[in-house]
Image (cartoon, rainbow, N blue to C red):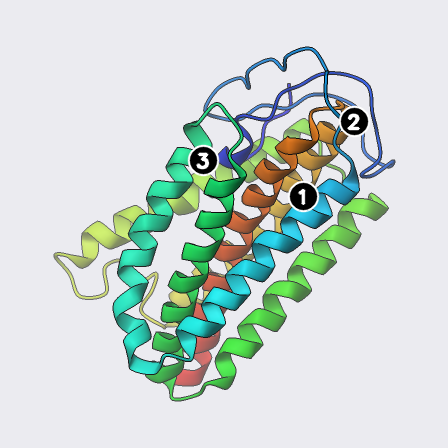
Amino acid sequence: MRTTSNPAFKNLPTTGGYANFNHGQGQGGYGTPFGQAPAAPPQTARPMTIDDVVTKTAITLALAVVTGAATYLMGPAALGLALPAAIIGLVLAMVVIFKKKVSPALVIAYSAVEGVFLGGISYLFAMLVDNPGIVMQAIAGTMGVFAAMLVVYKTGAIRVTPKLTKWIIGAVAGVAVLMLVNLIASFFVSGGLGLRSGGALAIAFSLLCIGIAAFSFLLDFDAADQAIKGGVDAKFAWYIAFGLMTTLVWLYLEILRLLSYFQND
């Protein structure tokens, strides 16, 4: 069973049969660090295709962009929406991850709320560095990394092997622990460990996070590939769209933060 660093894919079932997403990758199933995915019921509906993944992902991203732009254009009022949206988004994400039944409505709601959160955070960073252009730079950077990793995956330049998968999962867990320790340390020492203070260490840490987030896309693409090859129900494309959305949000935030460091120099 293949694993992925993205818990959004924990409910993807495994069967056998179809292939389409990328012919260069190997066969095999996948799971998550949170446990084995539940077995799929007998195939009774249309199997997932790459078009399903693209369509559902486009819907979630478009909704996040619309709500994010609307929030950003609210000006200072956007700042008060960021924290509530972050909390609501986290709750919705947990429900989507642990809910056994696919719920397109929850994924759509998550995307809309995340857009509000990103709009508020983007306005905050633009205000702090006094440069609204930083937002478009971060968006362009995020889309560029996403496109580059998709090309890397589809061409087979970097193959998703069990060893690479374990390395990425370990790296994600490692940076998560470092972020938590830095947050706790900041309660007692100004700047904590210095991972978010804007100095050389902070720049290096953000570059590390961006690199790990970029490589996480390979696992996301592979999970989508295996789902399509497994012939799972088309409705599970919403899970894949949700998983890609979570990685995109992380990558965007890290790029936005990195750009802000250089603006402050």
Horizontal relation, residue 63 to residue 263: left or right: right
Query: First in sequence: mark 1 or mark 2?
Result: 1
Q: Relative to residue 4, is residue 129 depicted above or below?
A: below
Residue ID at (33%, 55%): 86
Q: Nearer the viewer, residue 3 or 175?
A: 3
Residue on which disc 1 sits: 218
- Report helix, strand or loop for mark 1: helix
Marks 3 and 1: CB-CB under 8 Å? no
Q: Are marks 3 and 2 in contact (CB under 8 Å)?
A: no
> Which residue position holds label 2?
229
Sooner in the amino-acid sequence: mark 3 or mark 1: 3
Label count reads: 3
Does residue 265 appear in this view?
A: no
Q: Is residue 68 above or below residue 247?
A: below
Q: Nearer the viewer, mark 3 or mark 1?
A: 3
Residue occupied by mark 3: 96
User: Which label sits in the foreground, 1 or 2?
Assistant: 2
